[in-house]
Amino acid sequence: MTANINTTLLNDVDIEAVGGLIQAVAADPAKAATRWRAKVTWLGGFRSEAKVRSFAPIASDEPAALGGTDSAPNPVEQLLAALGNCLAVGYAANATARGIEIRELSVDIAGDLDLRTFLGLRPGGHAGFDDISVEVALESDATAEQIAELHEHVLSTSPVGHTLRAAIPLEAAISLA
């Protein structure tokens, strides 16, 4: 991507819009409190779809080896993708704020997950990822020091990264139809 010096865009990010949001939240911290939602509907088997705002549904399924029809990414793959997308947003926003042009950016994420707890073979065990590794490839004219500072900042401010690293309250209720 190239910087467009005739507008307020850098890395295809509207600098004035981001700056305006920062100023608005700094002036009124209550504006920082946001709530995000998704609604998931089961479609049969291991297929479901998530609806988020007015966007097209996001499909979910399991690979055939896990009993699904392999018609879409499974939830743990979507979790990895959510982290990668969050980090990409963080790099774009924070590079732009620093005046760093990004030519190319990719985030490769992998996680190790033991299925025994999910399958009921290890009751009380850990059902989630044992670890997640992230490899970021960023091409820019910025110095190695600037890139290292950007990287540390993005990792330390990623909402999805923080959510994965911290124990957070999770409440789940069920209602019978």
Image (cartoon, rainbow, N blue to C red):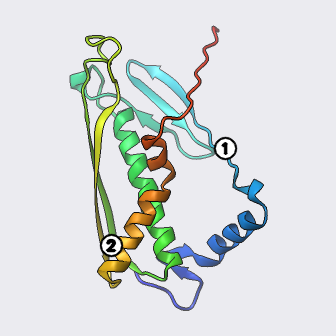
Q: Residue 45 carries which label?
A: none
Instruction: Judge left or right: residue 153 versus residue 114.
Output: right
Mark 2 belongs to which amino acid? Glu
Q: Which residue lies furthest to the left in this view?
A: 65
- Secondary structure under tag 2 reads strand
Residue at image x 25%, y 18%?
116
Residue 83 vertical position relative to residue 151 in the rendered view, above or below: above
Q: Which mark is residue 35?
A: 1
**In which quadrant will I find the N terminus?**
bottom left
Q: What residue type is labelled 1?
A: Arg
Q: Where is residue 45 in the image (x, y as percent from the top left)?
A: 38, 18
Q: Which residue is drawn at 27% across and 19% down?
A: 67
Question: Of the numbered discs in the image, which one, if any, rests on residue 104?
Answer: 2
Q: In this view, does 7 lie above or below 105?
A: below
Question: Which is closer to the viewer, label 1 or label 2?
Answer: 1
Task: Tell me the quarter of the picture where residue 175 sits.
Answer: top right
x, y percent for residue 60: 40, 33
Query: Is residue 73 in view?
Result: no
3D distance between C-alphas at marks 1 and 2 = 31 Å
- Judged from the image, the secondary structure of the residue bearing numbered disc 1 is loop
Percent position of residue 143, x then y: 32, 83
How would you rate the neighbour count of disc 1 (Cα within 10 Å): few for under 14, some for 14-19, many for 20 or more?
few
The quadrant of the picture occupied by the C terminus is top right
Question: Foreground: 112 or 43?
Answer: 112
Q: Is residue 72 left or right of residue 51?
A: left
Q: Residue at x 41, y 83 (%)?
A: 2
- Which percent across, then down, holds residue 123? 32, 11
In front: 38, or 145?
Answer: 145
